[in-house]
């Protein structure tokens, strides 16, 4: 029994040894763990310091693009035509939004965002930089801001920000020349400098806004900002300031533009005025027009459809894209060509029974005046009374080759190169052109039609204005320019001579154009009433539909849009030209309508507030 009990007695020495071994092992493990922790801490805090500092900064410090302020646009007298105004925008930071789709749906419920707004936002979101604020709606009303402000605590990553938005104070008056900015689309995005357009969502679409986009846009800046966990900016750490776009001063004159716009009174047409000395475009109006502000933040489908589907084509720039038969407005240039080439002299007369026939041809080419203008008529009277028969005969004797070359020297048949977008070149036909286009030879009867500005020939109002300006300058053609200066830079217009025509021949044509208005039988003599200055000009009536031989033009038998266009070109004062104009009004038939618009533009430029002719010689002396 005693021996049995001894087996179960404690061994203090063994237990102490076992405890010491286990304690040592535990301490060793703890020491190793401590060393590992210290090593890891050293690795993270010392060796990997730069990396984790950067990662930490990414959670609170972000680089944001700072879009530049778009350059302003002024008229020649310093009046704003395009400005930047402050508007409240709803912006989203996608990195701070846990559920983008849910957030968008909430905002749609609050503000009634359209599908177009959402789609545009998604396009913008696809090209944004990390932590960049992307607008989903620009131009919030007071009511909309209040609705959002109440729910902001439930909308992480959503903020209301003040942004500069393009605004056009004269909305439809300058729409076709200033153009507008609009949302950047996918095609434009592919061709953009993404670095310089970071944070910018609009781009020039038409007119001056598009032509001078790179100058107006400026250079983007950047800033490092510190944010809280909700993405709200706490402070700006440092910033590279953006370079604002350049301001543009145009040759356009608000007063002349308004005079033309009001005179056209919404009728389908165009009116252009050019400074004969510099080529500066003083006014360029196309009506009907549209409010360019509609496009800045994205036009609605309803509004765009109304503009696109209107039979009056308000989106169509008639001044640069409208191609019309120039009609009798080309007669002064053709008369000058006849004198220059020696085909006629000032004393040459042509029999005028009211019709003309080519040799060995039974066809009658009728004059607009069925009974003719006189038994015989010379070049001056033919211009004054707009005699078709004289110019049928002259064009036949000149031939299409000489006509083409002489007219081309005045700018017909190619774009003028004015600093605007989408200009068309008209059509100045030739033998080679017809052979290329129709694989047919040129016929003499087609030359006769060109002689009165009809047939194949087409011209834009800008070409007509440029050509009559060259007439006013005795053959010096100056490229039209809308831009007067850009900050301190002033562009030099291109100049070239037409044909070297003798001064005596210029005098014949210019005197005849003066008598169109101030002569007893002039086709625009109504303009001379109570005029404080003399005008040189030429009327024209362009056929829209052909009239069968032997039939008379019957306005009542035609639909309103098939009636003749009314044209006028001219310059003033006749003895010392300062302004050249071209006016086309569609389907109004009477050239007096277009001449009246031209006169209002001239009066606005040439007369002072008392209706007296401005002393330009004295002004030139002051300017010089």
Image (cartoon, helix red, strand yellow):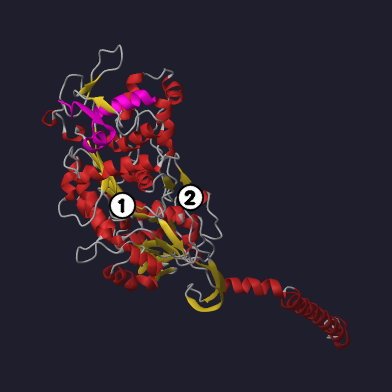
Q: Quadrant of the C terminus?
A: bottom left
The residue under label 2 is 494
Q: Residues within 10 Å of mark 2 (few under 14, many from 20)?
A: few
* Residue 562 in the image, given as x and y percentages of width and height: 20, 32
Q: Is residue 130 visible?
A: yes
Question: Upstream in the sequence, badge 2 or badge 1?
Answer: 2
Give the residue displayed 13% in from the left and 31% down from the top: 555
**Could you say which is closer to the camera, residue 141 or residue 365?**
365
* Residue 526 in the image, given as x and y percentages of width and height: 15, 46
* Residue 169 in the image, given as x and y percentages of width and height: 30, 63
Instruction: Please indicate whether residue 78 sits to the left or right of residue 287 in the image.
Output: right
Give the residue displayed 23% in from the left and 30% down from the top: 377
Q: Is residue 266 visible?
A: no
Where does the magenta region start and end? 371-399
Q: Residue furthest bottom?
A: 12
The residue under label 1 is 575
Quick check: marks 2 and 1 in contact, CB under 8 Å? Answer: no
Q: Is residue 156 magenta?
A: no
**Could you say which is closer to the camera, residue 113 or residue 194?**
194
**Could you say which is closer to the camera, residue 22 or residue 543?**
543
Give the residue displayed 44% in from the left and 32% down from the top: 405
Q: CA distance from mark 2 to mark 1?
A: 24 Å
Q: Against 388, is 240 above or below?
A: below
**Could you say which is closer to the camera, residue 260 or residue 136?**
260
Give the residue displayed 43% in from the left and 69% down from the top: 156
């Amino acid at each position: 029994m005693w021996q049995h009990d001894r087996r179960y007695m404690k061994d203090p020495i063994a237990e102490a040894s076992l405890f010491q071994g286990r304690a040592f092992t535990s301490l060793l493990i703890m020491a190793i763990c401590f060393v590992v922790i210290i090593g890891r801490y050293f690795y993270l805090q010392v060796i990997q310091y730069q990396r984790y500092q950067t990662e930490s900064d990414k959670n609170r410090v972000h680089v944001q693009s700072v879009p530049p302020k778009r350059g302003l646009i002024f008229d020649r007298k310093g009046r704003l035509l395009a400005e930047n105004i402050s508007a409240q925008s709803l912006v989203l930071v996608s990195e701070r939004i846990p559920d983008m789709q849910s957030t968008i749906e909430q905002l749609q419920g609050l503000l009634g965002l359209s599908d177009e707004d959402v789609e545009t936002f998604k396009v913008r979101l696809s090209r944004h930089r990390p932590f960049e604020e992307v607008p989903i709606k620009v131009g919030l009303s007071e009511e909309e801001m209040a609705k959002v402000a109440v729910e902001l605590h439930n909308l992480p990553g959503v903020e209301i920000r003040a942004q500069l938005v393009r605004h056009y104070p004269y909305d439809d008056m300058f729409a076709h020349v200033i153009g507008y900015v609009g949302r950047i689309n996918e095609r434009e995005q592919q061709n953009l400098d993404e670095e310089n357009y970071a944070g910018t969502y609009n781009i020039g679409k038409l007119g001056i806004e598009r032509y001078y986009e790179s100058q107006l846009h400026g250079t983007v800046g950047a800033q490092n900002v510190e944010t809280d966990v909700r993405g709200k900016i706490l402070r700006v750490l440092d910033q590279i300031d953006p370079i604002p776009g350049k301001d543009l001063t145009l040759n356009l004159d608000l007063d002349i533009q308004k005079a033309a716009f009001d005179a056209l009174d919404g009728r389908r047409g165009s009116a252009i005025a050019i400074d004969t000395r510099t080529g500066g475009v003083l006014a360029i109006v196309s009506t009907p027009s549209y409010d360019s502000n509609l496009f800045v933040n994205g036009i609605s489908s309803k509004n765009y459809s109304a503009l696109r589907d209107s039979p009056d084509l308000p989106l169509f720039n008639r001044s640069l894209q409208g191609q019309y038969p120039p009609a009798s407005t080309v007669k002064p240039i053709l008369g000058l060509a006849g004198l220059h080439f020696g085909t006629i002299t000032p004393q040459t007369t042509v029999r005028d029974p009211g019709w003309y026939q080519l040799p060995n041809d039974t066809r009658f080419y009728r004059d607009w005046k069925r009974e003719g203008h006189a038994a015989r008529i010379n070049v001056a009277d033919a211009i004054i009374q707009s005699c078709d028969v004289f110019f049928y005969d002259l064009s036949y004797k000149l031939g299409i080759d000489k006509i083409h070359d002489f007219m081309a020297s005045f700018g017909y048949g190619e774009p003028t190169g004015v600093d605007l977008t989408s200009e068309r070149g008209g059509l100045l036909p030739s033998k080679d052109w017809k052979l290329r286009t129709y694989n047919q030879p040129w016929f003499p009867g087609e030359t006769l039609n060109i002689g009165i500005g009809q047939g194949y020939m087409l011209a834009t109002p800008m070409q007509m204005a440029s050509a009559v300006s060259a007439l006013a300058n005795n053959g010096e053609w100056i490229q039209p320019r809308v831009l007067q200066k850009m900050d301190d830079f002033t562009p030099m217009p291109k100049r070239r001579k037409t044909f070297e025509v003798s001064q005596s021949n210029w005098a014949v044509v210019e005197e005849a154009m003066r008598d169109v208005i101030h002569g007893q039988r002039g086709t625009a003599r109504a303009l001379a009433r109570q005029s404080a200055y003399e005008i040189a000009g030429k009327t024209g009536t362009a056929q829209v539909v052909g009239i069968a031989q032997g039939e008379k033009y019957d306005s009542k038998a035609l639909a309103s849009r098939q009636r003749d266009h009314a044209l006028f070109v001219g310059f003033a004062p006749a003895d010392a030209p300062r302004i050249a104009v071209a006016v086309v009004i569609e389907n109004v038939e009477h050239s007096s309508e277009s001449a009246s618009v031209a006169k209002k533009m001239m009066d606005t430029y040439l007369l002072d507030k008392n209706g007296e002719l401005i002393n330009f010689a004295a002004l030139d002396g002051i300017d010089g």
